[in-house]
Image (tube, rainbow, N blue to C red):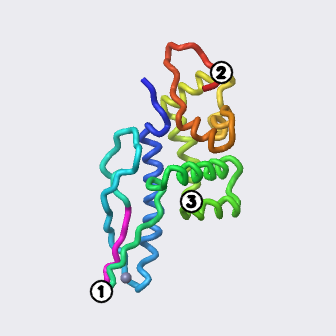
Amino acid sequence: MYATLLADARFHDLLLAVDRDLAEACRAEGCGCGGRRHVARYARKPRGRPCRLGPEHDQRFSFCCAVDGCRSRATPPSLRFLGRRVYVATVVVLIAILRHGVSDARLGRLSEVVSVDRRTIERWRRWWRDTFTATPFWRAARAALMPPPDGTQLPAALIDRFGGDAQDRLVALLRMRTPPVTGPRKRAF
Ligand SMILES: [Zn+2]
Protein backbone atom coordinates (compact mmCIF):
# COMPACT_ATOMS: atom_id res chain seq x y z
CA MET A 1 0.00 0.00 0.00
CA TYR A 2 2.61 2.53 1.00
CA ALA A 3 6.02 3.28 -0.36
CA THR A 4 8.75 5.57 0.83
CA LEU A 5 11.78 6.72 -0.98
CA LEU A 6 13.95 4.59 1.30
CA ALA A 7 11.80 1.59 0.49
CA ASP A 8 12.36 2.12 -3.21
CA ALA A 9 15.03 -0.28 -4.49
CA ARG A 10 16.04 2.26 -7.12
CA PHE A 11 17.15 4.69 -4.44
CA HIS A 12 19.48 2.00 -3.08
CA ASP A 13 20.63 1.15 -6.58
CA LEU A 14 21.70 4.75 -6.94
CA LEU A 15 23.68 4.65 -3.69
CA LEU A 16 25.28 1.40 -4.86
CA ALA A 17 26.22 3.00 -8.19
CA VAL A 18 27.87 5.92 -6.37
CA ASP A 19 29.74 3.44 -4.13
CA ARG A 20 30.96 1.59 -7.21
CA ASP A 21 32.40 4.85 -8.56
CA LEU A 22 34.17 5.51 -5.28
CA ALA A 23 35.49 1.93 -5.17
CA GLU A 24 36.79 2.11 -8.75
CA ALA A 25 38.72 5.28 -7.90
CA CYS A 26 40.27 3.52 -4.89
CA ARG A 27 41.24 0.46 -6.96
CA ALA A 28 42.75 2.58 -9.77
CA GLU A 29 44.83 4.55 -7.26
CA GLY A 30 46.76 1.42 -6.22
CA CYS A 31 48.56 0.68 -2.97
CA GLY A 32 51.09 3.08 -1.45
CA CYS A 33 53.77 0.41 -1.95
CA GLY A 34 53.16 0.47 -5.69
CA GLY A 35 51.21 -2.81 -5.67
CA ARG A 36 47.90 -3.40 -7.36
CA ARG A 37 44.71 -3.54 -5.35
CA HIS A 38 42.67 -6.71 -5.58
CA VAL A 39 39.01 -6.97 -4.68
CA ALA A 40 38.47 -8.20 -1.12
CA ARG A 41 34.86 -7.35 -0.31
CA TYR A 42 33.33 -8.16 2.99
CA ALA A 43 29.76 -8.96 3.87
CA ARG A 44 28.00 -6.26 5.83
CA LYS A 45 24.39 -5.21 5.92
CA PRO A 46 23.63 -1.49 6.13
CA ARG A 47 21.44 -0.70 9.13
CA GLY A 48 17.72 -0.12 9.03
CA ARG A 49 17.12 -0.89 5.42
CA PRO A 50 13.41 -1.34 4.87
CA CYS A 51 13.25 -2.99 1.46
CA ARG A 52 14.41 -6.26 -0.01
CA LEU A 53 17.49 -5.92 -2.15
CA GLY A 54 19.83 -8.24 -4.01
CA PRO A 55 22.93 -9.71 -2.33
CA GLU A 56 25.19 -7.15 -4.00
CA HIS A 57 23.78 -4.60 -1.56
CA ASP A 58 25.09 -6.56 1.42
CA GLN A 59 28.74 -6.18 0.48
CA ARG A 60 31.09 -3.40 1.39
CA PHE A 61 33.67 -2.70 -1.31
CA SER A 62 37.21 -3.26 -0.11
CA PHE A 63 40.62 -4.02 -1.59
CA CYS A 64 43.76 -5.83 -0.58
CA CYS A 65 47.26 -5.13 -1.91
CA ALA A 66 48.46 -7.94 -4.21
CA VAL A 67 52.08 -7.72 -3.02
CA ASP A 68 53.26 -10.45 -0.61
CA GLY A 69 54.49 -8.89 2.61
CA CYS A 70 52.27 -5.83 2.16
CA ARG A 71 48.67 -7.01 1.73
CA SER A 72 47.43 -3.64 2.99
CA ARG A 73 43.70 -3.33 3.03
CA ALA A 74 41.98 -0.26 1.61
CA THR A 75 38.29 0.39 2.09
CA PRO A 76 36.87 3.27 0.06
CA PRO A 77 34.27 5.66 1.50
CA SER A 78 30.67 4.62 1.03
CA LEU A 79 27.33 6.39 0.88
CA ARG A 80 25.59 3.19 1.98
CA PHE A 81 27.57 2.65 5.15
CA LEU A 82 27.62 6.14 6.60
CA GLY A 83 26.20 6.67 10.07
CA ARG A 84 22.65 7.93 10.03
CA ARG A 85 23.38 11.55 10.98
CA VAL A 86 26.26 11.86 8.55
CA TYR A 87 24.17 10.21 5.88
CA VAL A 88 21.37 12.74 6.23
CA ALA A 89 23.80 15.66 6.31
CA THR A 90 25.51 14.36 3.19
CA VAL A 91 22.30 13.97 1.26
CA VAL A 92 21.24 17.50 2.28
CA VAL A 93 24.43 18.91 0.79
CA LEU A 94 23.91 16.85 -2.35
CA ILE A 95 20.44 18.27 -2.68
CA ALA A 96 21.81 21.80 -2.33
CA ILE A 97 24.20 20.97 -5.15
CA LEU A 98 21.41 19.59 -7.30
CA ARG A 99 19.39 22.69 -6.65
CA HIS A 100 21.94 25.47 -6.79
CA GLY A 101 24.69 23.87 -8.81
CA VAL A 102 28.15 22.63 -8.00
CA SER A 103 30.38 25.06 -6.18
CA ASP A 104 33.82 24.47 -4.76
CA ALA A 105 32.47 25.23 -1.27
CA ARG A 106 29.72 22.60 -1.55
CA LEU A 107 32.06 20.00 -3.00
CA GLY A 108 34.43 20.82 -0.13
CA ARG A 109 31.74 20.20 2.50
CA LEU A 110 30.87 16.94 0.85
CA SER A 111 34.50 15.89 0.64
CA GLU A 112 34.74 16.04 4.42
CA VAL A 113 32.59 12.92 4.46
CA VAL A 114 33.08 11.26 1.15
CA SER A 115 34.91 12.27 -1.99
CA VAL A 116 32.32 12.93 -4.66
CA ASP A 117 33.25 14.27 -8.06
CA ARG A 118 31.19 16.08 -10.67
CA ARG A 119 30.57 12.86 -12.58
CA THR A 120 28.93 11.31 -9.52
CA ILE A 121 26.75 14.37 -9.04
CA GLU A 122 25.70 14.16 -12.67
CA ARG A 123 24.55 10.61 -11.92
CA TRP A 124 22.38 11.94 -9.05
CA ARG A 125 20.86 14.54 -11.33
CA ARG A 126 20.00 11.91 -13.90
CA TRP A 127 18.48 9.68 -11.24
CA TRP A 128 16.07 12.37 -10.03
CA ARG A 129 15.16 13.38 -13.58
CA ASP A 130 14.76 9.97 -15.24
CA THR A 131 14.39 7.22 -12.65
CA PHE A 132 12.57 8.93 -9.79
CA THR A 133 9.96 10.49 -12.08
CA ALA A 134 9.07 6.98 -13.34
CA THR A 135 8.10 5.70 -9.88
CA PRO A 136 4.51 5.24 -8.64
CA PHE A 137 5.66 7.24 -5.62
CA TRP A 138 6.27 10.30 -7.78
CA ARG A 139 3.03 9.91 -9.73
CA ALA A 140 1.04 9.74 -6.48
CA ALA A 141 2.85 12.75 -5.02
CA ARG A 142 2.20 14.76 -8.18
CA ALA A 143 -1.49 13.88 -8.09
CA ALA A 144 -1.80 14.82 -4.41
CA LEU A 145 0.03 18.14 -4.42
CA MET A 146 -1.51 21.32 -5.79
CA PRO A 147 -0.01 22.80 -7.83
CA PRO A 148 1.85 19.66 -8.98
CA PRO A 149 5.60 19.86 -8.36
CA ASP A 150 7.74 20.49 -11.43
CA GLY A 151 9.50 17.24 -12.39
CA THR A 152 12.42 19.13 -13.92
CA GLN A 153 13.15 20.81 -10.56
CA LEU A 154 13.61 17.71 -8.43
CA PRO A 155 14.32 17.15 -5.65
CA ALA A 156 13.89 20.83 -4.72
CA ALA A 157 10.31 20.93 -6.04
CA LEU A 158 9.32 18.27 -3.49
CA ILE A 159 11.47 19.47 -0.63
CA ASP A 160 10.05 22.98 -0.86
CA ARG A 161 6.67 21.60 0.22
CA PHE A 162 7.93 20.85 3.71
CA GLY A 163 8.66 23.18 6.59
CA GLY A 164 11.70 23.40 8.84
CA ASP A 165 15.37 23.52 8.03
CA ALA A 166 17.03 21.55 5.27
CA GLN A 167 17.49 18.46 7.39
CA ASP A 168 13.87 18.46 8.63
CA ARG A 169 12.70 18.75 5.06
CA LEU A 170 14.83 15.90 3.85
CA VAL A 171 13.65 13.62 6.62
CA ALA A 172 10.06 14.59 5.80
CA LEU A 173 10.70 13.73 2.16
CA LEU A 174 12.21 10.37 3.05
CA ARG A 175 9.23 9.63 5.27
CA MET A 176 6.68 10.81 2.78
CA ARG A 177 4.16 8.15 1.95
CA THR A 178 2.05 7.89 -1.10
CA PRO A 179 -1.55 8.72 -0.29
CA PRO A 180 -4.18 6.00 -0.79
CA VAL A 181 -5.40 6.11 -4.35
CA THR A 182 -9.01 6.54 -3.27
CA GLY A 183 -8.30 8.91 -0.36
CA PRO A 184 -9.07 12.62 -0.19
CA ARG A 185 -6.67 15.02 -1.85
CA LYS A 186 -4.30 16.76 0.47
CA ARG A 187 -2.50 20.01 -0.12
CA ALA A 188 0.67 18.84 1.60
CA PHE A 189 2.02 15.75 3.26
ZN1 LIG B 1 50.94 -2.76 -0.94
Residue 53 relative to residue 144: left or right: left
CB of mark 1 within 8 Å of CB of mark 3?
no
Say which label, 3 or 2, has the lower sequence index: 3
**From the Cβ of disc 3, is ligand 1 less than 8 Å away?**
no
Q: Nearer the viewer, residue 128 or 176?
A: 176
Residue 21 relative to residue 66: left or right: right
**Residue 169's x, y, as percent?**
63, 38
Residue 128 on the magenta span: no
Say which label, 1 or 3, has the lower sequence index: 1
Residue 100 relative to residue 72: left or right: right
Badge 1 amino acid: Gly
Q: Secondary structure at mark 3?
A: helix
* Number of residues whose C-alpha sits closer than 10 Å to that of mark 1, classed few (under 14), some (14–19) or many (20 or more): few
Vertical placement of residue 126 versus 81, above or below: above
* Number of residues whose C-alpha sits closer than 10 Å to that of mark 2, classed few (under 14), some (14–19) or many (20 or more): few
- Judging by the rendered image, the residue that carries numbered circle 2 is 187
Per the rendering, the mark at residue 119 is 3
Vertical placement of residue 139 versus 28, above or below: above
Badge 2 amino acid: Arg
- Displayed quadrant of residue 119: bottom right
| Quadrant where ligand 1 appears | bottom left
**From the Cβ of disc 1, is ligand 1 less than 8 Å away?**
no
**Residue 136's x, y, as percent?**
48, 29
Q: Nearer the viewer, residue 96 or 101?
A: 96
**Residue 160's x, y, as percent?**
68, 36
Q: Nearer the viewer, mark 1 or mark 3?
A: 1
Vertical placement of residue 52 versus 63, above or below: above
Give the residue displayed 31% in from the left and 62% down from the top. Answer: 42
* Number of residues whose C-alpha sits closer than 10 Å to that of mark 3, classed few (under 14), some (14–19) or many (20 or more): few
Per the rendering, the mark at residue 69 is 1
Badge 3 amino acid: Arg
Which residues make up the magenta segment? 61-68
